């Protein structure tokens, strides 16, 4: 019986592990059809490609669950509720300029405890927040 070190070096084994991990995450995360997976594995030979696909099919749900758990572990805080108010701020006593401000109140649940957060933003900061939330929403929709 041959030793693993006789086949490849430790570095080559680690590269293989990283490659398979990446392949499994991408194909499960993007719900790639089996035909596309086989096409991407065409360089390794049909027998090996079929073996990898068999493993992927058998472990697809476990990989999906691991991806969901990994995503959920990014932050253990969840938004419970929010409220907002528009305020006009005077820059001087002569009302020479008014600045519109948004006061955003967030109720965030973190480690089981409700934590109130309050953020005050001007128009530009609000636009940046909206753009970021829209981009995040697109990513979430692509993952579904």
Image (cartoon, rainbow, N blue to C red):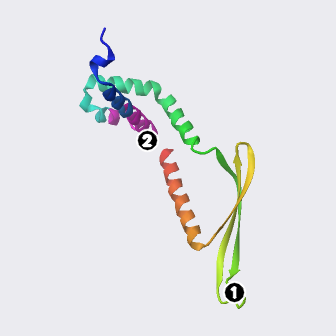
**3D distance between C-alphas at marks 2 and 1:** 55 Å
Q: Position of residue 50 (x, y in %)?
A: 32, 24
* Left or right: 129 as drawn, with respect to 5: right
2 or 1: tag closer to the N-terminus:
2
Q: Quadrant of residue 51?
A: top left
Q: Which residues are magenta?
A: 20-37
Q: Residue at x 60, y 45 (%)?
A: 75
Q: Residue at x 34, y 29 (%)?
A: 16
* Left or right: 116 as drawn, with respect to 51: right
Look at discs 2 and 1 and give the one toward the viewer: 1
Q: Quadrant of residue 112?
A: top right
Residue 1 sits above or below residue 67 on the image? above
Residue holding disc 2: 30
Residue 53 sits above or below residue 6 on the image? below
Is 73 or 67 nearer to us in this picture? 73
Q: Residue at x 45, y 24 (%)?
A: 58
Residue holding disc 1: 92
Local SS, label 2: loop
Q: Is residue 35 magenta?
A: yes
Local SS, label 1: loop
Q: Position of residue 15 (x, y in %)?
A: 34, 32
Q: Is residue 42 magenta?
A: no
């Amino acid at each position: 019986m041959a030793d693993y070190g006789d086949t490849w070096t430790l570095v080559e084994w680690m590269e293989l592990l990283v490659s398979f991990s990446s392949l499994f995450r991408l194909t499960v995360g993007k719900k790639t059809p089996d035909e596309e997976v086989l096409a991407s594995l065409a360089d390794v030979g049909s027998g090996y490609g079929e073996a990898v696909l068999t493993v992927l099919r058998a472990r697809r749900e476990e990989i999906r669950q691991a991806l969901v758990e990994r995503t959920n572990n990014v932050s253990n805080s969840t938004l419970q509720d929010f409220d907002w108010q528009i305020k006009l701020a005077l820059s001087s006593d002569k009302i020479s300029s008014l600045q519109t401000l948004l006061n955003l109140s967030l109720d965030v649940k973190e480690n089981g405890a409700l934590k109130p957060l309050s953020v005050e933003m001007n128009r530009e900061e609000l636009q940046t927040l909206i753009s970021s939330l829209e981009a995040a929403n697109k990513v979430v929709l692509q993952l579904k």
